[in-house]
Amino acid sequence: MGGSRTVPAPVELVELRILEGPNVYFPRPAVKLTLETPGWLRATTARSERLASSMRMPETTRAGDAGTDQRQRFAARLGAHVTREIATATGTRR
C-alpha cells in the first residue's frame, strides 16, 4: 500500500487579524497578516533568484543555497519587498 505524502504549501497563513478602529499602533483600522514561507526557504537558488527578479528586486540580490543563513536573509528581504509593493499598489501610506 502506498502512503500519501503531503507537500507543504510554499506560503502558509499563520494569522490574519482585522484591527478595528484606533489601537496602540495605528489611529485607524489596520490588518495584521502573518505568513510562513517555507517554499521560499526550500526553493532552488535559480528559482529564488528568478522570483526576486520577477518582483523587481535589485539585480544584485542573491538568494544563497537552501537552508543557509543567506537564504533566510533573502526570504526576509523578499517579504519586506513584497509588503512595500502591496502597500504602494494599494495607496497605503505610513
Image (cartoon, rainbow, N blue to C red):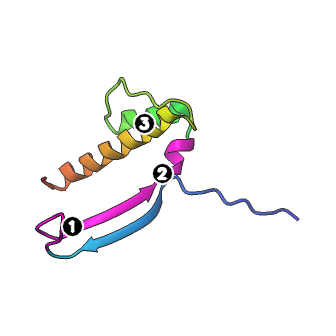
Q: How many numbered discs?
A: 3
Residue at the image position 50 percent from the left and 29 percent from the top: 64
Residue 80 horizontal side relative to residue 75, left or right: left
Above or below, comparing residue 22 to residue 41 in the picture: below
Query: Magenta residues, as a range?
Result: 22-42
Residue 14 horizontal side relative to residue 43, left or right: left
Q: What residue type is labelled 1?
A: Ala
Please say if the residues under marks 2 and 1 sit with CB atoms less than 8 Å apart. no
First along the sequence among labels 3 and 1 = 1
Residue at the image position 31 percent from the left and 28 percent from the top: 58
Residue 4 location, x and y as percent? 75, 63
Residue for badge 2: 37
Residue for badge 1: 30
Residue 5 location, x and y as percent? 72, 59
Residue at the image position 40 percent from the left and 67 percent from the top: 15
First along the sequence among labels 2 and 1 = 1
